[in-house]
Image: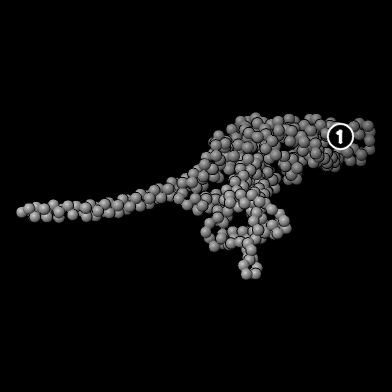
Amino acid sequence: MVPNNAAGPSHSGGGTPETSRHLTAGEHAEYERLRGAAKVRHRRLRHVGASVLLLLALLLAPLAVVAAWVDDEVSDTDRYVQTVAPLASDPAVQDVVIDRLTNRVVENVDVEAVTAALTKALADAGAPPSAVEGAAALDGPLLSAVMTTADRVITRVVTSDAFQQAWEGANRRAHAAVVNMLTGEREGAVRATDDTIELDLGVVVDEARQSLVDAGFDKAAAIPDTDRTVTLFETGQLGKAQDAMRLLDVVGTWLPVLTVVLAALAVWTAPAHRVMLMVTAAGVGVTMVALLVALAVVRRAYLDAVPSSALPADAAAAIFDTFVRFLRDSTRTLLVVAVITALAAYLYGPGRAARGVRALARRGTTAAGRSLHRAGVRTGSTGRWLDDHRPWTTGVVIGAGALALVLWNHPTVGAVALVLGVVLAVLVVAAVLAAAATPEPAAADGEPAGPVP
């Protein structure tokens, strides 16, 4: 019995470690499975989070651009003056002003009373009947002469540099009129009245009236101070537009910041940062194109809504284009930045074309650096440091370029091209200096030395 008892524990003791090792392997496999499933869930969650953030950023991008433009126009007097200044020198707008003022002068010259007084004076003086009848027929020629003279004087005033300066000065003093237009206030040079936005030409009328008086037209002093406005907009949606503009003005400062933060979080949250950066840049580019198309549609609707009796089509187009030109410029600038960003993200990727471009650039800078080294230019430790820290130096240079655009006051497409050119030039110089730090490898067995791989 003892052997059996001894064998029992021996068998049992021998089986226990084997069973234990089997369970440990199973537990390990289960652990790895659960760990892999957790990684998959985490990756999917990051994809979903990045997608939501990207969608919010793309939806807010056009609103952020418009909000920033509205905020600039309202809060920055110099920016507002830059916006409206070209209207004073636009031929279509000048023609409208000249025609309105000329008609106002002619309306206040009573030609019939002048000819009647002349006819009576001649008759009382015993002039021949033919002379009296001739004086009575002077209505047409006198009216034409008054209109011609008034048009010539007013044209000289409106097309002069003095008018340009007066226009800019009046708009600078009346910058609050932009706020009045957006908030519905009925004061200032630009004011909202019911569903109509009007421009008060009071300063221009005063100057033209004084010039006509100085030229000998005493009747011009009777030009009234009332009804001297030009209708800029007529729309039944003015109230809604004002509400939207007020909302955009409130968020004009923080909405662009929020949009940039959401886009950055989308790139940071995504598992593949470079791919998400490409997608984000491409999405921003598409939204900017959509905004440009929307501006074109709004322009067409505006021109169709303004009656020709209130404002000629060419003048209406000039006014609209002048007011929104900075918005168009900002949209085009962001479109160019988005395209450049997407292209840069692609060139850092594993694509065949990207690898070819990088290899070509590396061969070119290496060849230039070797040429400098053979010419006696030595960059020493500086060049070796640049070569060892190439990714860091590249990132710093690109980051500096991006920061320059952020700090640039209203960057344009030209500014983006300038910054891009400087960044590329610095990167090329750094690569050439790094390549010039070491000599070209010596060839073996008399064979010509080849390029550094």
Give the image quarter of residue 228.
Answer: top right
Tell me: residue 420, above or below residue 226. Answer: below
**At numbered mark 1, what does the secondary structure look like: helix, strand or loop?**
loop
Image quarter for residue 307? top right
The residue lying at 26 percent from left, 52 percent from top is 24
Residue at 61% x, 30% y: name it.
185
Residue 251 in sight in this render: yes
Res. 59 visible in picture: no
User: How many residues crowd around disc 1 within 10 Å: few (fewer than 14), some, or many (20 or more)?
Assistant: few
Q: Nearer the viewer, residue 156 or 88?
A: 88
Q: Which residue is under mark 1?
A: 215
Q: Position of residue 66 (x, y in %)?
A: 58, 42
User: Residue pushed farthest left?
Assistant: 1
Pick the residue in front: 229 or 81: 81
Tell me the residue at 55%/45% (across/down): 62
Q: Residue at x 72, y 56 (%)?
A: 376
- In front: 358, or 146? 358
What is the number of callouts on the image?
A: 1
**How far from the left and from the top, in percent, is residue 321?**
66, 46
Q: Is residue 159 above or below residue 3?
A: above
Of 451 and 276, nearer the camera is 451
**Is 239 drawn above or below residue 37 in the view shown?**
above
Q: Quadrant of the C terminus?
A: bottom right
Q: Amino acid at mark 1?
A: Ala
